[in-house]
Image: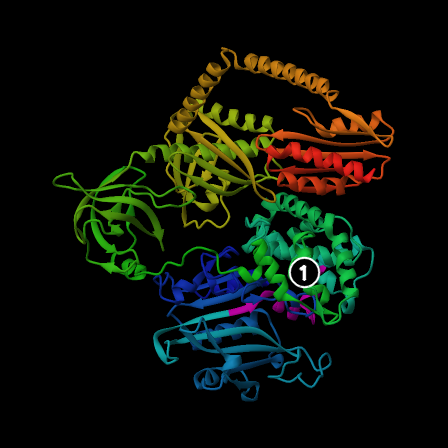
């Protein structure tokens, strides 16, 4: 049974709009990952944005709980239900239906669609929720309805805000399987399995804890797909279902050992972690040492370590991706499209960890042998810093032994290295913007963007906000804030393209009344950041004028599209966009690729783009539904929000992309295209920086200026010939210098003390170590100390062969005379001095030392 499809079809038949699963990286600065089905609707529930139409929704949302507050990582594999990645089925009502319909829908779906036996179902309600209990009594015997307290049956989004009682549906897995002391309804055992939670958001909690009834209460429900699959398939563990078993069977073949549930935690960890790593990589998250990328790295390396425990010694996770795509690619089609890229990125990361895991485990075992209660934080840090073992992986390895890591020591060392791990996460790093946006949308609706057709418009100032996004009636001269125009030609920053700048002018006098510094989107409102020149008031009529830099932005944006196509044609279809920046004077494009581009590949990409520029291909912009756009071959970016109608930007067959940005009318307008830099961003992600249009002209102009200076300095019209001539001259001079130094080597004065040849002298140039080696080779018994001036300083070196003098001790005696110090071996030592004026005294003392010690 396709439970996903059955759930969505059921709620579509009840008038719900079906929403696709939102990205795992949420549009929420307070969350690491999307961790519940309601996250995409959070701003609706909190009242930040208006209620959608229709005011009821349903989805199957992919979720991850592996970092921050919601972290199930350490339990994965050891229980039947914990996962880092899971799917949440949910239906939502935004002030529409409430308890009566929510309960009726849930009961109908569970008993008539899923066909779960009624005698196996139990229900809980909040101890104060008589209304829910009365409704449930229509479907369930009263003795199967339990009242529970706040801990189990009251839900709240935060310390303040929407909250309310909840009701949960439980499934009895059978006394024959679970008969422990906690296996009763309401106990902590596994016999009674919660399968669906219905949250009745009917209150608003204030900062003092007071509850106020909401005028339009809402519904938020969540049902874990993995749990329902287990129930439908008659399995006692989620891991025994068809969502996981094909992966476990594939691991079984790799390992060559049968999977036994009781001892198979490592198999389950691998199966679970394959799902989370594949989905994150497919959605554009990449391995790194901070934030989400570090959580991704931790998950993969934890899986690799479990594979290592099973005897695997080479990358294996990447080989399991095909199995997962076979299971889930039908519903999440982007997995099919991104499969090869995911495998490449995964293999690279696995190879990195496999290169160090053996040495790391050896260090771990060595320290463990000396550990009683607390594992060294210093060794844990070395495992992290040198061998790539995340801290929680080391903790995981110690878990079965009941030993903790010295966290204080580990974190002290982490702080010194300025590394960031899970504990350092403070959200996405984006500022959380709060303002009167909902009120603006309700009062004025979304403003109209006319910037595709025109760079000017006569507009009305419908609203003004200060820098804190609070509504104000006016902005005084020199004051900054935000303006909402009824119609605006200013493009709001989106899709990597910078927001427009420009001016607001008086319609009557054409004088500037405000400078437009930036333009951004807030909940689909197009707002421009302004600095008032004269007083600006709500209801003012102004002429909005976009700066001419927009033309250069359009050139760079169109060039970015051509660059994307060039990379896919030259490097392969695995290339996909991982980020971009489009400004008036440059572009930056991040893309998936496992290694640095060669000089030949960079030249080929640059040539490909310039060829399309020279062809003068007309640009075409069309609006169509998303399926038609994909059928046309348009490339869509994962995570971008596309409406019912999408905008398709094409340049012949060379480039077809979904894009809301501004572009040139013909590729010839782009002008010259130059790649200025290629570099790595993170594992498996490369970056190209480039310029075109006026910026490319400036680059070439600067290059010509530099070339002219080089020609002038070399006094040659052909710089290459000039450089070759210079190199030849340098080579000849070096040879002459070597010969001169050789001739000076024999200029040192030697004498004999007790049958030993001794040399204590100052030399002007040459390699004094080589001179000492030559003297040692020339004499059977010799002691040498040479001094060489280096400006105001002195270089000292000493050596001996077959004598009772120790070079290191000798140097230590003499160097302080010159204000320096040093030392070395018995046969050779060197030092530095700061006072060259005392070389004469040092020579005398050095000779006296020899006379005393030979």
Q: Residue at x 72, y 40 (%)?
A: 811
Q: Residue at x 70, y 39 (%)?
A: 814
Q: Which residues are magenta?
A: 222-245
Q: Residue at x 62, y 29 (%)?
A: 789
Q: Secondary structure at mark 1?
A: helix
Quadrant in which the N terminus appears: bottom right
Q: Residues within 10 Å of mark 1 (few under 14, many from 20)?
A: some
Vertical order, 340 against 99 (above or below)? above
Where does residue 327 sit, x and y in percent of width and height? 65, 55
Closer-to-camera residue (468/215)? 468
Vertical order, 341 against 58 (above or below)? above
The residue at which mark 1 appears reads as 378
Q: Is residue 742 left or right of residue 13?
A: right
Vertical order, 572 against 168 (above or below)? above
Closer-to-camera residue (443/762)? 762
Closer-to-camera residue (512/557)? 512
Where does residue 187 sit, x and y in percent of width and height? 62, 83
Where does residue 42 sit, x and y in percent of width and height? 43, 64
Please say whether residue 241 is visible from this viewpoint: no
Q: Is residue 399 left or right of residue 15?
A: right
């Amino acid at each position: 049974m396709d439970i996903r499809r059955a759930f969505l079809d059921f709620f579509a038949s009840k008038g719900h709009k079906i929403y696709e699963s939102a990205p795992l990286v949420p549009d929420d600065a307070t969350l690491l990952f999307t961790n519940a089905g309601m996250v995409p609707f959070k701003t609706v529930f909190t009242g930040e944005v208006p209620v959608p139409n229709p005011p009821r929704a349903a989805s199957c949302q992919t979720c991850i709980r592996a970092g921050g507050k919601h972290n199930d990582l350490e339990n994965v594999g050891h229980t039947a239900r914990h996962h880092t990645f899971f799917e949440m089925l949910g239906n939502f009502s935004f002030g529409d239906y409430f308890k009566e319909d929510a309960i009726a829908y849930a009961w109908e779906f569970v008993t008539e669609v899923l066909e779960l036996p009624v005698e196996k179902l139990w229900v809980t309600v909040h101890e104060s929720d008589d209304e829910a209990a009365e409704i449930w009594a229509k479907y369930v015997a009263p003795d199967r309805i339990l009242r529970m307290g706040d801990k189990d049956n009251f839900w709240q989004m935060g310390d303040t805000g929407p909250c309310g009682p909840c009701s949960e549906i439980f499934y009895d897995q059978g006394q024959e399987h679970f008969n422990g002391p906690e296996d009763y309804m309401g106990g902590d055992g596994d016999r009674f399995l919660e399968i669906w939670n219905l949250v009745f958001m009917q209150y608003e909690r204030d900062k003092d804890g007071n509850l106020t009834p909401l005028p339009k209460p809402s519904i938020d429900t969540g049902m874990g797909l993995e749990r329902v699959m287990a129930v439908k398939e008659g399995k006692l563990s989620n891991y025994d279902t068809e969502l996981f078993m094909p992966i476990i069977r594939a691991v079984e073949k790799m390992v060559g050992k049968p999977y036994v549930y009781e001892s198979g935690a490592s198999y389950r960890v691998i199966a679970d972690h394959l799902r989370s790593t594949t989905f994150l990589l497919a959605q554009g998250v990449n391995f790194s040492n901070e934030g989400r990328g570090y959580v991704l790295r931790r998950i993969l390396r934890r899986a690799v370590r479990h594979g290592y425990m099973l005897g695997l010694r080479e990358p294996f996770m990447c080989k399991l991706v095909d199995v997962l795509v076979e299971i889930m690619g039908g519903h999440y089609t982007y997995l099919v499209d991104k499969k090869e890229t995911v495998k490449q990125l995964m293999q690279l990361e696995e190879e990195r960890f496999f290169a160090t895991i053996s040495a790391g485990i050896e260090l771990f075992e060595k320290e463990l042998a000396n550990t009683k209660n607390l594992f060294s934080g210093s060794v844990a840090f070395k495992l992290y810093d040198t061998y790539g073992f995340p801290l929680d992986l080391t903790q995981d390895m110690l878990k079965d032994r009941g030993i903790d890591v010295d966290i204080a020591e580990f974190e002290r060392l982490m702080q010194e290295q300025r590394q960031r791990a899970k504990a350092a996460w403070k959200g996405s790093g984006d500022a959380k913007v709060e303002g009167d946006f909902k009120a603006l949308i309700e009062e004025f609706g979304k403003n109209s963007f006319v910037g595709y057709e025109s760079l000017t418009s006569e507009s009305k100032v419908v609203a003004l906000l200060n820098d804190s996004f609070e509504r104000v009636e006016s902005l005084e001269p020199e004051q900054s804030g935000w303006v909402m125009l009824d119609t605006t030609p200013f493009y709001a920053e989106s899709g990597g393209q910078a927001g427009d700048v420009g001016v607001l002018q008086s319609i009557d006098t054409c004088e500037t009344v405000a400078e437009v510094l930036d333009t951004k989107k807030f909940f689909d409102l197009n707002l421009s950041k302004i600095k008032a020149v004269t007083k600006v008031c709500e209801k003012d009529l102004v002429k909005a004028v976009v700066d001419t830099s927009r033309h250069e932005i359009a050139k760079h944006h169109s060039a970015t599209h051509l660059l994307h196509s060039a990379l896919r044609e030259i490097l392969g279809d695995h290339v996909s966009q991982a980020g971009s920046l489009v400004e008036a004077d440059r572009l930056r494009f991040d893309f998936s690729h496992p290694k640095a581009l060669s000089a030949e590949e960079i030249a080929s990409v640059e040539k490909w783009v310039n060829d399309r520029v020279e062809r003068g291909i007309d640009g075409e912009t069309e609006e169509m539904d998303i399926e038609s756009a994909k059928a046309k071959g348009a490339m869509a970016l994962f995570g971008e929000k596309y409406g019912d109608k999408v905008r398709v930007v094409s340049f012949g067959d060379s480039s077809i992309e979904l894009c809301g940005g501004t572009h040139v009318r013909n590729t010839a307008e782009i002008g010259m295209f130059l790649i200025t830099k290629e570099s790595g961003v993170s594992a498996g992600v490369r970056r190209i920086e480039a310029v075109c249009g006026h910026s490319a002209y400036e680059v070439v102009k600067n290059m010509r200026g530099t070339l002219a200076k080089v020609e002038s300095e070399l006094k040659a019209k052909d710089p290459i010939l000039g450089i070759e001539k210079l190199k030849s001259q340098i080579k000849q001079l070096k040879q002459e210098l070597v010969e001169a130094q050789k001739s000076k080597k024999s200029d040192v004065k030697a004498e004999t003390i007790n049958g030993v040849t001794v040399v204590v002298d100052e030399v002007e140039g040459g390699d004094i170590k080589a001179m000492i080696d030559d003297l040692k080779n020339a004499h059977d018994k010799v002691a040498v100390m040479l001094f060489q001036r280096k400006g105001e300083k002195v270089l000292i070196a000493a050596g001996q062969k077959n004598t009772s003098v120790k070079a290191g001790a000798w140097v230590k005696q003499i160097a302080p005379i010159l204000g320096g110090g040093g030392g070395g071996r018995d046969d050779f030592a060197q030092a530095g001095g700061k006072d060259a004026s005392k070389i004469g005294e040092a020579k005398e003392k050095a000779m006296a030392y020899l006379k005393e010690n030979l």
